[in-house]
Amino acid sequence: MVTDKRLSLIKRVVGNRQLDLTIVLENIHDEHNVGAIFRSADAVGIQEVQLLYSKEKFPALHPKVTASGGKWVKQNKYDDPVKLAKNLRSRGFNLYTTQLNSDAVPIHEIDWTLPSAIILGNENRGVSPEIVELADKNIVIPLFGMVTSLNVSVAAAVILFEACRQRNVAGNYPNPDLTSAWLEVMTQNWIRINQKNR
């Protein structure tokens, strides 16, 4: 039986879910990086993460790293970038790759209140050329030191919390677009997850 305090928390968190903000992990190798990204995704209210694995094996999620974020965030698995892009576009998402090149747009110049999918690439190879070609824009985190890049999980957190900041200013927390029917279904689902993992 879920306590009143736990039920209140579940309802609050479900009400903050952002259905039109997602993150795509393309062949990210380090499971600790993957877990940390899931933790950040849950923290900003992301409902689902897209796993695009065509070269690496699908990662396992360690509860200690995700802080249980993995069980509250849905995983959609793909091995084909074209299929992934087609699916996200059919749902109205703009696709943004994190690729260091001359046409990259600073993250603060993106309107993150619009449906957005943030694509992060492998720690060594980066985002694949195939997915770069399918994206709307490349984005970059402005850096002002000698270091020219961030760890992928840190980069994910920086971008996600800029999106969160913009959406919070716009009044998206709690999310006014969530229907009462959706909220009820998700609340009941989360109660079941909560009881299963006790």
Image (tube, rainbow, N blue to C red):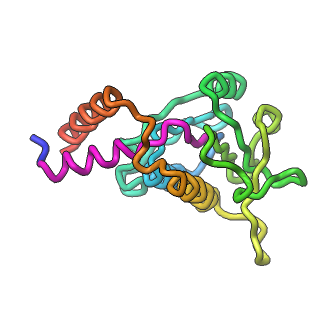
Residue 16 image offset from top left, x and y in percent:
40, 46
Instruction: Name the foreground residue: 126 vs 31.
Output: 126
Q: Is residue 33 visible?
A: no
Q: Residue at x 69, y 46 (%)?
A: 121
Quadrant in the rendering for residue 145: bottom right
Residue 8 image offset from top left, x and y in percent:
21, 49
Q: Residue at x 44, y 54 (%)?
A: 43
The verdict on residue 187 being magenta is no
Magenta span of residues: 4-24
Q: Residue at x 61, y 40 (%)?
A: 24
Q: Is residue 7 visible?
A: yes
Q: Is residue 178 left or right of residue 168?
A: left
Which residue occupies the extreme right position in the image?
Answer: 102
In this rendering, the answer to whether 175 lies above or below 130 is below
In this rendering, the answer to whether 5 lies above or below 149 is above
Instruction: Name the foreground residue: 184 vs 50.
Output: 184
Name the image quarter holding the C terminus.
Answer: top left
Residue 90 image offset from top left, x and y in percent:
64, 22
Q: Is residue 55 left or right of residue 169?
A: right
Residue 46 image offset from top left, x and y in percent:
48, 44
